[in-house]
Image (tube, rainbow, N blue to C red):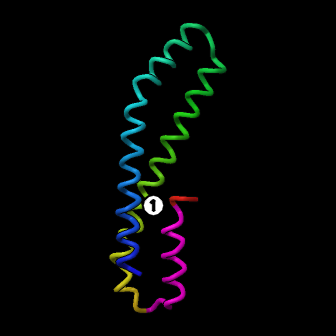
Amino acid sequence: MGNILIISGIFWMSVNSLLALRLGLQHHPHVRLLKRLMKQNEYEEFENHRSDWEWKRTVHGHQMLMSLVSIVIGLLVPHMTNSSGLYIYIMGTMLMLAPIL
């Protein structure tokens, strides 16, 4: 399970890097839109776009952390001699599915 967790973590980290590129490409147009909305006193639309951006950024950050946690736990699995195989299997499965959920 340790090797699978490491591979899964690296896979999700790669996917997350692509999402980061997408967010980075959207950043300047997003900032321009927010400036335009503020000048036009469109505060409700400004807040909707700002909160949407915050949501995307938060999801990106949490996915990256879950990838790193998966890799670290994957490295530790061989040393978890006191844990049952079922526990390690359930924990590993949940860590692999967490970025999707």
Any magenta on residue 20?
A: no
In this view, the residue farthest toward the top is: 40
Side of 52 relative to 1 (left or right)? right
Residue at 42 percent of width and 37 percent of height: 23
Q: Quadrant of residue 64?
A: bottom left
Q: Quadrant of residue 50?
A: top right
Image location (x, y in percent) of residue 94: 54, 71
Q: Main secondary structure of the magenta part?
A: helix
Q: Quadrant of residue 67?
A: bottom left
Residue at 53 percent of width and 66 percent of height: 97
Q: Which residue is mark 1?
A: 66
The quarter in which the C terminus is drawn is bottom right
Up/down of 85 relative to 15, above or below: below
SS class, disc 1 = helix
Residue at 54 percent of width and 59 percent of height: 100
Image location (x, y in percent) of residue 35: 49, 15
Any magenta on residue 90?
A: yes
Up/down of 21 relative to 78, above or below: above
The quarter in which the N terminus is drawn is bottom left
Image location (x, y in percent) of residue 8: 40, 67
Could you tell me the amino acid type at mark 1?
Met
Image location (x, y in percent) of residue 10: 34, 63
In this view, the residue farthest toward the right is: 44
Total residue callouts:
1
Up/down of 49 relative to 68, above or below: above
Up/down of 87 relative to 69, above or below: below
Side of 48 relative to 1 (left or right)? right
Residue at 55 percent of width and 40 percent of height: 55
Magenta-drawn segment: 82-98
Q: Residues within 10 Å of mark 1 (few under 14, many from 20)?
A: some
